[in-house]
């Protein structure tokens, strides 16, 4: 007899899902018994970390990743970072054990009641097979759903007694095209509008980076002479931030964003929402007389845009076909100065001091994973992203993604053989959300530099409180945690830098260390403006 488990494991091999990110529980042990020697199990000590390590790995390898968590409580622990994976458009096959089928009617301990509903609406497909024999076919369908545009996580609830049952023949591996071409008539109309525009603006969104279309984005910008912006709150970078046509990121509030677009008669948003807002600052969505066209691979994203026309398409295919139709314009391309200011060293250091010192020793191919929201403008100013697939953060705004995701990115760099150095910039507030992921970094010897700017406060929340005129909010100052004991207790190397020269030397040395290094840098308590 061939069991459901044997068939399922064999199908995982066919789909190249032989790395499993997990935290085992009683309802998963039947799946994990006699774990195959050709598989790799990446253990994390809490399911939130499991989810985001897999997210970072999938984004780095540009392939789906397989996640296994513990029934309802484990999936509940993972939910915050599952929201982020959904908004990141990361293809994850998330599985969780379920109690024995014979007892489900009684809702015993550790049963996942209404399991398929639990992770919705943050998964593309969610299912608990009706019979054990459907488990392998459900994996094939889950994989197909995860990789279809827009990519994203899916969920399977798998009863623990299904694995020993007799299987049906293994379902055939199906291949699926994963790119959607644009409507040719709508694209021709957009090309003509770009040619006719007096002062076009291009917003280069995260889907361009996912599509591997940086060169096409640069070519379109240079051919049209358009001003280029990054969308607000973009989780990936899709255009070289030191390019003279790049004008920076748009603010994430309605009225300030519209003001930033004033003077542009045509705005083309490629691979991003319209728009990702944060504080409510009312006003017009666009300046008077400005037309907007959005290109997105997500019909839901197109439907919820409050203004503009939409074209559903893969960002790379749309750029490629626009380049075939747009004529080289005579308009003069804008030029923007990207020389970062030279900070005046202070004690404690400022975020400007910190990132300026890192810039001195930055390798050209360095990857940055970021979760230090109050310091993000300074990071981009001193460490502009110049290459594809080199910047990752959370699309959701939820903390707890960055540290484990950076571990996944570092493991992905090893798995692909690129071995680019990875710098994780994690604020001291964010650092504690998924701190147990440090154990995975140490266990897997992830080649990773974790830079912790320490201001002992949730500075981004203080900025938001100031913007919203809500003084006296409790809980925005952090106690003086001992980061050194936490880092070394989990098995990571620890350093502390207090001057720009210290930081430069420590960061440079960390790139040669075969394992994770945590570098704490005390910085001043300046609360930046939110907008």
Image (spheres, rainbow, N blue to C red):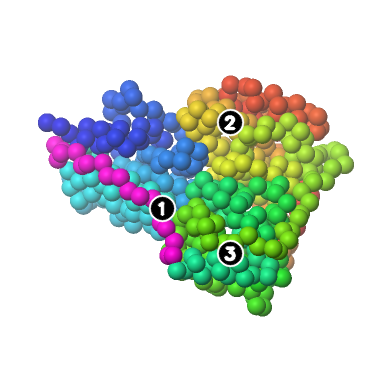
Tell me: residue 142, above or below residue 424.
below
Q: Which residue is mark 3?
A: 268
The first of marks 1 and 3 along the sequence is 1
Q: Is residue 168 magenta?
A: yes
Element class at badge 1:
loop
Q: Which mark is residue 20?
A: none
**Residue at left 49%, top 65%?**
187
Report x, y in % for residue 74. Answer: 40, 43
The first of marks 3 and 2 along the sequence is 3
Decide which of 337, 477 is in the foreground and name it: 337
Report x, y in % for residue 335. Answer: 76, 55
Q: Quadrant of residue 367?
A: top right
- Magenta-drawn segment: 166-184
Q: Which residue is mark 1?
A: 179
Decide which of 381, 397 is in the foreground and name it: 381
Report x, y in % for residue 306. Answer: 54, 72
Residue 29 at least partly seen: no
**Residue at left 51%, top 46%?**
212
Name the quadrant of the N terminus. Answer: top left
Report x, y in % for residue 210. Answer: 50, 48
Q: Which residue is mark 2?
A: 420
**Residue at left 76%, top 33%?**
360
């Amino acid at each position: 007899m061939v069991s459901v488990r044997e068939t399922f494991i064999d199908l995982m091999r066919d789909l190249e899902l032989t790395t499993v990110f997990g935290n085992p529980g009683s309802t998963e042990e039947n799946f994990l018994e006699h774990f195959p020697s050709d598989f790799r199990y990446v253990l994390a000590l809490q399911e939130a970390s499991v989810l985001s390590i897999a997210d970072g790995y999938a984004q780095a390898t540009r392939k789906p990743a397989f996640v296994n968590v513990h029934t309802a409580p484990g999936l509940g622990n993972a939910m915050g970072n599952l929201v982020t994976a959904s908004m990141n458009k990361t293809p994850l096959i998330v599985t969780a054990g379920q109690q024995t089928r014979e007892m489900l009617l009684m809702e015993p301990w550790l049963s996942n009641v209404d399991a398929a509903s639990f992770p919705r609406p943050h998964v593309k497909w969610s299912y608990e097979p009706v019979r054990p024999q459907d488990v392998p076919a459900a994996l094939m369908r889950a994989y197909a759903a995860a990789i279809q545009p827009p990519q994203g996580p899916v969920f399977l609830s798998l009863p623990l007694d299904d694995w020993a049952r007799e299987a049906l023949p293994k379902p055939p591996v199906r291949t699926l095209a994963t790119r959607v071409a644009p409507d040719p008539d709508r694209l021709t109309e957009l090309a003509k509008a770009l040619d006719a525009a007096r002062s076009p603006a291009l917003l280069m969104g995260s889907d361009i980076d996912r599509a591997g279309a940086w060169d096409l984005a640069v070519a379109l910008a240079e051919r049209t002479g358009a001003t280029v912006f990054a969308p607000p709150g973009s989780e990936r970078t899709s255009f070289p931030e030191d390019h003279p046509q790049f004008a920076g990121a748009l603010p994430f509030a309605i009225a300030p964003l519209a003001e930033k677009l004033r003077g542009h008669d045509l705005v083309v948003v490629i691979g991003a929402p319209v728009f990702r807002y944060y504080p409510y600052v009312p006003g017009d969505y666009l300046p008077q007389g400005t037309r907007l066209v959005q290109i997105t691979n997500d019909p839901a994203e197109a439907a919820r845009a409050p203004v503009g026309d939409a074209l559903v398409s893969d960002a790379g295919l749309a750029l490629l076909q626009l380049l075939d139709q747009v004529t080289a314009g005579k308009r003069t391309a804008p030029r923007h100065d990207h020389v970062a200011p030279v900070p005046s060293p202070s004690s404690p250091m400022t975020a400007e001091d910190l990132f300026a010192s890192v810039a001195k020793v930055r390798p050209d191919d360095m990857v940055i994973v970021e979760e230090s929201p109050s310091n993000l403008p300074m990071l981009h100013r001193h460490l502009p992203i110049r290459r594809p697939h080199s910047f990752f953060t959370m699309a959701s705004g939820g903390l707890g993604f960055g540290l484990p995701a950076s571990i996944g990115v570092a493991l992905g760099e090893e798995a692909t053989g690129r071995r680019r150095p990875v710098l994780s910039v994690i604020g001291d507030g964010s650092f504690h959300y998924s701190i147990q992921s440090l154990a995975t970094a140490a266990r897997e010897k992830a080649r990773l530099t974790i830079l912790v700017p320490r201001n002992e406060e949730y500075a981004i929340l203080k900025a938001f409180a100031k913007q919203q005129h809500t003084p006296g909010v409790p809980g925005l100052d952090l106690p003086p945690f001992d980061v050194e004991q936490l880092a070394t207790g989990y098995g990571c190397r620890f350093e502390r830098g207090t001057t720009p020269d210290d930081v430069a030397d420590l960061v440079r040395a960390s790139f040669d260390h075969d394992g994770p290094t945590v570098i704490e840098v005390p910085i001043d308590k300046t609360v930046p403006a939110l907008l």
